[in-house]
């Protein structure tokens, strides 16, 4: 995502750009064909690293999509980015039942038949009464107060105080009810931010929580969606490579970007405080040296760390902090089903599942006849599931995902999703309808499990170690979701923003007078500004936040 963004911004400003890629384009945003599944003139079944989610607070990715042409006068954003106006919430505990809720007034109208029916009403009442009984009102009020503290904290306090605390510490989970800890603190955090509350920065989790709900107010014109018209939750209407990555690469090639596939960086050559070349290899023994005017390391954290050798760190000592950054696993699996789901187009949050599962039935939002378009005709829907916790024991084998075989992972995820979604009187998942499944090929066993696509996690007090797009080496720049950005979370949006920051840094370093790439802030509600100013005065005076009692 970051590398393609750098290429996009610079090629449109007259630079010559060459991208070296050892594996595949698109990174964690890509999709892929499931091998040996195409038949009868149909496309292969669609696999992916994980299902895509474009919340209303995303600004950079939709802007880039709008600049990628498809179908004559169309573009990726207008042709393929669509609203998902429903959500299914399933709490994985006896006594709860899954409920379908609208995300907007339009969503309520669109999904009225699934929302206003006896089973969903019964499930809603049952779940509401139980959650009210399980989480004491004073704890619920306390949780809301903690989020309000984040919302009204000045930037100095967010960086100077809340960044240094974990989310678990900030919301003072210790001593609270088990439901408070399990659902409000842990499950909600994992489902919305894919972060571990005991490790994640309170600043990051609190800010992104605000960013996810703010678009629904309709008060921020820069954000997509409103509580009336919807659009706060969006997906692509087909496999990612088909409608986004491939058209993007085609556009960049047409503008002159060169792609060298099967070649990855193995070392940076440094002399005189600058990068003088990059050693690249095909992984099979063939290597060469690449020279250029400007060098961009747009690669995941785990690939960057081994390249920051003493010569690089001597020229740019601040990059040593990158070694302190941590990554984690969030990987997807797809289940191909013989029947199209009755669930309306909705993201599914299976709160409280041991492996922190979220999902999406894809036939509905894609508005496609799966049986006619994909596979061999037997598959009529795809449940795409993201697995966000690989370190908690599951319910079938008592093992973490990292301890399981490929087949055990598939069975365990299916069992956890089924248990959460089938607590109502009508089951949503049926074993008899499962045709096949596909796990992200980035997970391999050789012989132990490994993950080729981990993502950085914003642990408490990690901001100080994050690199900026420019470095002390004047011709060396860093892109990726680990770079300091306004959204401050390892996402497609963060990677895209970092790519724009790299492009702007190169424009500055080269003395170019080209217009800089747009970089957008995270917008917050203007009426909060006076409260933030009051808190700024208190913070500078050494006083706590006025509500932090």
Image: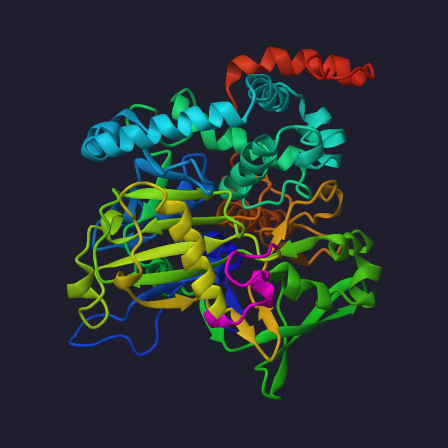
Q: Quadrant of residue 141?
A: top right
- Seen in the picture, residue 235 relative to 522 is either above or below; the reply is below
- Write the residue at 37% across / 32% down: 224
**Residue 274 falls left or right of residue 509:** right
Can you give x and y, in whole percent of width and height, for residue 430 in the image? 29, 56
Overall secondary structure of the magenta stretch? Answer: loop
Tell me residue 212's x, y (percent): 47, 33
Q: Which residues are magenta?
A: 392-407
Closest to the observer, 283 or 441: 441
Q: Residue at x 59, y 82 (%)?
A: 283
Q: Nearer the viewer, residue 549 or 265?
A: 549
Give yes or no for residue 91 being in the magenta stretch.
no
Query: Which x, y percent locates residue 287?
Result: 62, 84
For this orientation, the residue located farthest to the bottom is 285
Instruction: Name the colour scheme.
Output: rainbow
Relative to 134, say whether 490 is above or below.
below
Residue 453 visible to the viewer: yes
> Is residue 406 within the magenta segment?
yes
Q: Is residue 414 left or right of residue 519?
A: left
If the image is split into quadrants, where does the C terminus sit?
top right
Left or right placement of residue 543 versus residue 179 in this view:
right
Point 38% across, 66% down: residue: 253
**Image quadrant assignment for residue 399:** bottom right
Where 465 falls versus 7 (above or below)?
A: above
Q: Position of residue 221 (x, y in %)?
A: 40, 25
Report whether residue 249 is seen: no
């Amino acid at each position: 995502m970051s590398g393609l963004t750098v290429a996009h911004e610079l090629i449109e400003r007259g630079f010559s750009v060459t991208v070296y890629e050892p594996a595949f384009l698109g990174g964690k945003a890509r999709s892929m064909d499931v091998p040996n599944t195409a038949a009868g003139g149909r496309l292969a079944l669609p696999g992916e690293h994980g299902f895509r989610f474009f919340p209303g607070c995303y600004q950079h990715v939709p802007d880039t999509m709008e600049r990628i042409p498809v179908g004559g006068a169309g573009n990726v954003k207008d042709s393929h980015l669509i609203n998902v106006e429903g959500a299914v919430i399933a709490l994985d505990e006896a006594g709860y039942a899954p409920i379908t809720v609208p995300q907007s007034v339009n969503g309520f109208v669109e999904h009225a038949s699934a929302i206003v029916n006896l089973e969903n009403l019964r499930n809603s009442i049952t779940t509401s009464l139980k959650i009210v009984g399980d989480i004491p009102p004073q704890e619920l009020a306390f949780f809301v107060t903690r989020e309000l503290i984040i919302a009204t904290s000045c930037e100095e306090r967010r960086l100077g105080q809340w960044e240094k605390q974990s989310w678990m510490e900030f919301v003072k989970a210790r001593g609270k009810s088990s439901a408070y800890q399990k659902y409000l603190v842990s499950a909600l955090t994992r489902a919305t931010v894919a972060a571990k509350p005991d490790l994640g920065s309170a600043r990051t989790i609190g800010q992104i929580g605000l960013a996810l709900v703010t678009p629904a107010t309709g008060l921020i014109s820069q954000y997509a969606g409103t509580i009336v018209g919807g659009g706060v939750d969006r997906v692509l209407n087909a496999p990612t490579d088909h409608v986004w990555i491939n058209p993007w690469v085609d556009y960049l090639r047409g503008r002159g970007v060169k792609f060298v596939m099967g070649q990855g960086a193995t070392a940076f050559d440094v002399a005189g405080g600058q990068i003088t070349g990059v050693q690249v290899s095909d992984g099979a023994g063939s290597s060469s040296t690449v020279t250029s005017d400007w060098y961009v390391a747009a690669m995941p954290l785990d690939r960057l760390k081994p390249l920051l050798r003493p010569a690089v760190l001597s020229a740019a000592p601040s990059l040593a902090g990158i070694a302190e950054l941590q990554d984690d696993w969030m990987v997807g699996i797809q289940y191909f089903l013989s029947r199209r789901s009755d669930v309306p187009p909705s993201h599914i949050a299976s709160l409280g599942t041991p492996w922190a599962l979220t999902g999406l039935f894809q036939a509905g939002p894609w508005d496609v006849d799966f049986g006619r378009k994909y596979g061999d005709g037997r598959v009529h829907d795809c449940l795409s599931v993201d697995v966000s916790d690989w370190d908690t024991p599951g319910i079938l084998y008592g093992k973490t995902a990292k301890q399981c075989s490929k087949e055990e992972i598939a069975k365990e995820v299916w069992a956890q999703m089924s248990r959460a979604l089938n607590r109502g009187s009508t089951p949503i998942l049926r074993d008899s309808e499962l045709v096949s499944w596909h796990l992200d090929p980035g997970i391999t066993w050789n012989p132990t499990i490994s993950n080729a696509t981990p993502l950085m996690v914003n642990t408490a007090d990690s901001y100080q170690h994050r690199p900026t797009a420019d470095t002390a080496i004047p011709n060396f720049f860093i892109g990726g979701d680990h770079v300091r950005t306004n959204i401050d979370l390892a996402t497609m949006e963060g990677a895209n923003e970092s790519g724009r920051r790299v492009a702007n840094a190169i424009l500055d370093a080269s003395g170019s007078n080209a217009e800089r790439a747009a970089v957008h802030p995270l917008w917050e509600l203007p009426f909060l500004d006076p409260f933030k100013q009051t808190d700024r005065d208190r913070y500078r005076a050494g006083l706590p936040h006025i509500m932090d009692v």
